[in-house]
Amino acid sequence: MSSSQRDYWLILITSLIAIGFGVAFVARHLNAASDGARIVPGEVMADGVMVSPLRNVGLQPGDWVVAVEGRSLEDWAGNLFGRRLPLPAWGLDEVVWYSVVRDGKVMDVPIKLGPYPLWEFSIIPGALSFL
């Protein structure tokens, strides 16, 4: 096999693997439940994150999420690096309670989970930083 043929096959195989990962990502998220919001890039405080809702689920632009189901975001973030909490098994149409700071007041907001908004994330700048 010549060098150019080997390069062709290497590029083809690498491209197919990359496409496979993309398809797997989309397939996984098509069936995932979502709160329909994304983290506003650069808007993070010590105990919460500002979110921007992509659909009407109870969150409002400028809400600071400080807890989910009574657990602080610090606890949830720590769960990424060491299993301190059981993994939630939330599904579509379930209600999850968020504690948010809105207009300087802490309030609990019920969030009905819906389908993962792939389309909205794909067209928003900075969309890979979502909640």
Image (tube, rainbow, N blue to C red):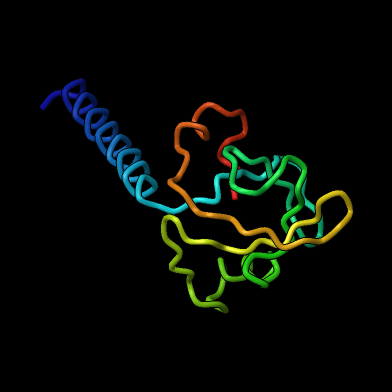
Quadrant assignment, res 127: top right
Query: Please, which residue is most extreme toward the top here?
Result: 4
Query: Residue, x 20% and y 20% (percent of image)?
Result: 4
- The answer to whether residue 89 is left or right of residue 95 is left
Query: Residue, x 52% and y 35% (percent of image)?
Result: 121
Q: Quadrant of the N terminus?
A: top left
Q: Is 46 drawn above or below residue 86 in the view shown?
A: above
Q: Is 90 drawn above or below residue 56 in the view shown?
A: below
In this view, the residue in front, 51 or 105, is 105
In this view, the residue in front, 58 or 7, is 58
Spot occupied by residue 32 in the image (x, y as percentages of width and height): 40, 52
Quadrant assignment, res 36: top right
Q: How many marks?
A: 0
Query: Residue, x 81% and y 60% (percent of image)?
Result: 46
Query: Please, which residue is most extreme toward the right here?
Result: 104
Query: Residue, x 32% and y 37% (percent of image)?
Result: 18
- The answer to whether residue 76 is left or right of residue 108 is left
Spot occupied by residue 85 in the image (x, y as percentages of width and height): 55, 77
- The answer to whether residue 27 is left or right of residue 54 is left
Quadrant assignment, res 2: top left
Spot occupied by residue 93 in the image (x, y as percentages of width and height): 45, 56
